[in-house]
Amino acid sequence: MDQRSQYRVNTTRLTPGEVILYKLRPDQRPLRPEKQWRGRILHVVIGGVNVESLEAGYEGLIEYVEFKQVVGIEQRETESL
């Protein structure tokens, strides 16, 4: 069984360019632990993904997000013909 199949989101389907929603870990000492952060996946690596933050004030910040932090994947807008 793939280790990534144990998480809330099907992390086996995460690909670069997708926008994910994630929560900060307790050891990151978030002021609002329930806040969902947005980031665009740059690379899928062992145990998680590297994302570029899309949050106001944090644009361009690159951070490592563990698979267990991912709570959702934003739906891509379909391009019209």
Image (cartoon, grey):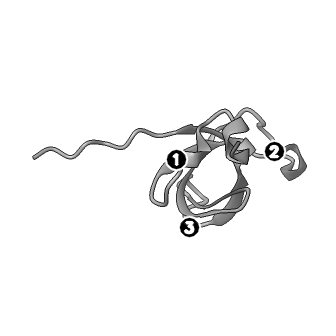
The residue carrying mark 3 is: 60
Residue 40 seen from this side: yes
Give the farthest residue toward the left.
Answer: 81
Give the farthest residue toward the front.
Answer: 1
Q: How far apart are marks 3 and 2 (CA)?
A: 19 Å
First in residue order: circle 2 vs circle 1:
1
The kind of residue on which mark 2 rests is: Pro
**27 left or right, relative to 4:** right
First in residue order: circle 1 vs circle 3:
1
* Mark 2: few/some/many CA within 10 Å (<14, 14-19, 20+): few
Q: Distance between the residues labelled 1 and 3?
A: 24 Å
**Residue at x-position 68% and y-position 63%:** 63
The residue carrying mark 1 is: 13
**What percent of the width, then of the height, locates residue 37?**
62, 45
Label placed on residue 81 = none
**What percent of the width, then of the height, locates residue 76?**
36, 43
The kind of residue on which mark 3 rests is: Gly
The residue carrying mark 2 is: 30
> In which image quadrant can residue 48 be found?
bottom right
Foreground tag (2 vs 1): 1
